[in-house]
Image (spheres, rainbow, N blue to C red):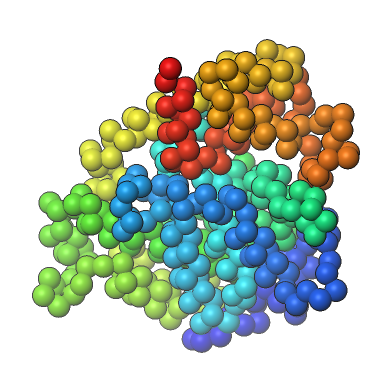
Amino acid sequence: MKNIFENYAAKENNPKWQNIIARKSPLYVRSSDIRSEFERDYTRIIYSNSYRRLKHKTQVFFSPENDHICTRIEHVTHVESISYSIANYLGLNTELTKAIAVSHDLGHSPFGHIGEKILSSLSKDDLGIPFWHEKNGLNLVDSIELLEDSERHKQNLNLTYGVRDGIISHCGEIDENGIKPRDEFIDLSAYQYPNQFAPYTWEACVIKISDKISYIGRDIQDAITLGILDKHLDELYSLLNYNRTDNALNNSNIIHYLVDDLCENSSPEKGLCFSDDAFHLMNKIKEFNYKNIYFSNRIKPSNRYFELVLTEIYSTLKSCFDGKSAFSSVKVLEKFYPTLYKDFSSFLFSFYDYPDRVSSVYKNSVLFEDSCSHDFYQAILYFISGMTDNYAMEIYNEIIGF
């Protein structure tokens, strides 16, 4: 039913409102600013470097020369579109869904989910904790990504709680039907693993479902474009109950069916849910994708290459630390790896304390202690996670070249 969630939207009459729009500290104020809190978040996100880099990060298939294959930035745009349709129909706050949608995957590493697994292995070895993109995304918008303010100072993004919660709560690997938000206003640093808590708003619940709707359909279309599913098309037509003559096997038809079904079957009492038929089909599609796409032999060679690239970059940076000072340690990189030295030292400069920091343009939080190996390894992981695919390969080639 249209607008059935209107009374539960993230708006001023919502009892959670002050928590949803809360920031860690006030943003600078312009007397003539006409934007809402979520509009300010949206523009802060799309003007950030992390957002721009998504256009050169793998979604599923590494194919930088093929303009018809989905990249990470196209995925977040698809999620924005799908979530807008759902939220608009149900009567929820589309400004909040837009802001969460464009930011939900900012924490992704280069090379898609295989890159995430590689960084997680390195993180477990040296920091004792896994790397997962939802938590990395929250850390990024809270502490890593910087924007210039109205006085040319570099500041943290400082997004609202509602958007920050949507980022860390968005895990699309869900198998439950009937998603509802939690009531508790928690410290988001309490998250220890993906999908640990339900989102705080209905809007963030919409993103959680839109993420899954987006990728299961688009991944099929990309796999068909690349010829990976040539031997499995009959199985897919049968799964979808499509007739080859009458039904187009494309992203549009899959998304339309799932979005329409979700909007017709959801209610505040039942939660955001599909019919039994649609929910079963979505999970069968996901199972098909894992078997025939994500574990396909076609992508295994590139996965091995990605592991080589990321572990070599990490090892090179880790090996230079002398246990005394991050800044003096990275100096040894300058002769043989000038690009890596310039960019990593600049990254460190943004987040370490130093004598003239008070008078510098950096007004963001200090994150790392100069002589702490744990902090240095964490800085490396943050640095690598922000790389684009092409930049990571460029740095790898610089490391192995003479």
Q: Is residue 7 visible?
A: yes
Please determine whether, in this image, residue 273 is positioned above or below residue 2: above
User: Where in the figure is residue 27, as x and y percent of width and height?
Assistant: 81, 60
- In this rendering, the answer to whether 326 lies above or below 172 is above
Q: Quadrant of the C terminus?
A: top left
Q: Name the image quarter holding residue 175.
A: bottom left
The vertical placement of 253 against 372, above or below, is below
Number of dots carrying numbers = 0
> For the point 49% across and 51% down, which residue is it?
54
Does residue 179 appear in the picture of this structure? no
The image quadrant that residue 255 belongs to is bottom left
Residue depicted at 31% across the width and 35% down the height? 302
Vertical placement of residue 3 versus 402, above or below: below
Q: Give left or right: position of 388 versus 197.
A: left
Please tell me which residue lies in front, 182 or 84: 84
Residue at left 42%, top 27%? 397
Residue 99: x and y in percent read 61, 65
Question: Camera-side residue: 286 or 314?
Answer: 314
Residue name at image x 16 percent, y 64 percent: 238
Residue 262 lies, in percent from the top left, at: 43, 74
| Residue 73 point in image, percent of width and height | 47, 57
